[in-house]
Image (cartoon, rainbow, N blue to C red):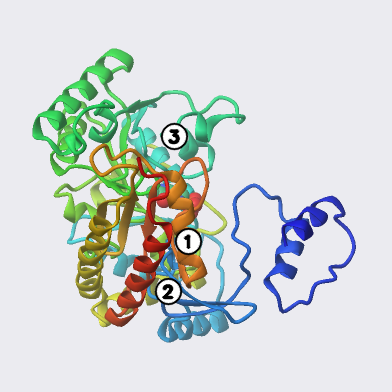
Amino acid sequence: MVESLERARIDAPGRSNLAPDTNDYWVELDRRHRIQSRHTHPICLTRGEGAWLWDVANNKYLDFESGQICASVGHSNPTYVAAVKEQLDKLVQTGSCYIDATQVRFQEKLASTTGGHFQQSFLACSGSESNEAALRLAKSYTGRSEVVSFMGNYHGHTFGAWSITGFGDKARAGFGPPMPGVTFLPTPYDYVMPGEPRYAYRDESVIAACVRFCEKMLDATTSGKPAAIVVELLQSAAGVRPLPIPFVQAIRRICDERGALMIADEAQTGLGRLGSWWGFEKFEVVPDIVTASKTLGGGAPLSAILVSSRLGQEAVLRGYRQSSSHTGDPLLCAAGLATIEIIENKDLLRNVRTVGGYLKEELQKLCDASPIGGEMRGEGFLLGLELVRSKQSGQPNGEATQLFTDECRKRGLLTGWWPVPYLAANVVRLMPAYTLTMAEAQEALSIVEASLKAVGRTGAV
Ligand code: PMP
């Protein structure tokens, strides 16, 4: 197959000699016609049902990535499909100078999930866009332009979102200067130095020292009064790293003291993935702006910023303006509304907590039994399985991670790990649909067990 891919790269035009019901055929065409700017597995998916996907050759996979962490209520959920089809027949799009009932109903329903904290939203399509909107609102509300972010935060690929993404040269090289006025601070994970004890990032004294250092950095390298501080409460791409709660609370205090808005990017933690409606509930803070995307549309491209009505109204008075051709499209809002209603009616938050808790516990046992298994991090259906060179040092084992995910895929389990520079090299993300059953969880566990056995001591020292 590799040979056929090479050929496809060289002779772009022409027809494939491969049969169209094979993965190789579609991979070859994909190589010809899509700009090859990201890694893809040689699998052509054709349909999905619940937590399952099928490829063109009718191979079946357990999808522990939920599409791209978006298909929260499962693939082709019948209630979701019916709601979207019904809206499709009625109205797909309106000009943004009009309102429509589906959009209003969705925004009302979205507000109802926030425990009374957020009544207003601006809707868009992607996570990057929602972060752009949050920055725009924070800047016009505060009249300031500096923004603070953290090492290991991921916020997207548009200019502002990319500029506040803390992956250094891995994300930066070749794209010119980022947005001015951005400062990065360490989280306790990056504040810990090599050679310090393995789990030092959890120590109260380390967290407190990190907070002091962040405040010192703010005073030394910025005006000290930024427009916003942006957090990813659980840094997913950086290796499923939940920020310690006292650290998040200190950021809240720092924002209050300095008149900055606290923005929480909940692309992954929002709308149920942690087993609560919102991640901020788990981290015991209320941000000023929450950005939501991925999980929000159940697979349809829908994103939002959420604010209190006080902040929303005051921001507009102070000059905040935001528009898009696709803000609040009825079709997308119908998908969002159906997603929230399904989570509610099927009690899926409880399912995420129960099955997620079971999965995490059982996976930790498998990690403990493997010579290269590290710690299980995360919560609900946003779990990270860490592979290490030695249990004592916790040194990352990228070599085993690649092999392990290949072994899982061979056995029919798709994980959220790919070989790209800005994802943690040794943390395999497991993020199934909220509808995952106990039996499906057990099936995944036996694949993980067999794959860990197949990987053996690879990369161990
Ligand atoms: N924020 C976070 C936390 C994300 O994980 C992502 C996507 N991986 C984004 C923002 C960007 O979202 P999108 O790809 O939809 O622009």
Of callouts 3 and 1, the N-terminal one: 1
Image point 37% across, 62% down: which residue? 453
Residue 400: % across, % down: 43, 50
- Calculate the distance from the C-alpha at mark 3 to the C-alpha at mark 1: 20 Å
Image point 50% across, 57% down: which residue? 125
Q: Is mark 2 within 8 Å of ligand 1?
A: no
Residue 167: % across, % down: 44, 34
Secondary structure under tag 1 reads helix
Label ID, residue 102:
2
Residue most extreme to the top: 220
Image point 78% across, 77% down: which residue? 19
Residue 191 vertical position relative to residue 358 in the rendered view, above or below: above
Q: Which residue position holds label 1?
A: 68
The amino acid type, in three-letter code, at marker 1 is Gln
- Calculate the distance from the C-alpha at mark 3 to the C-alpha at mark 2: 38 Å
Q: Is mark 1 within 8 Å of ligand 1?
A: yes
Residue 108: % across, % down: 30, 67
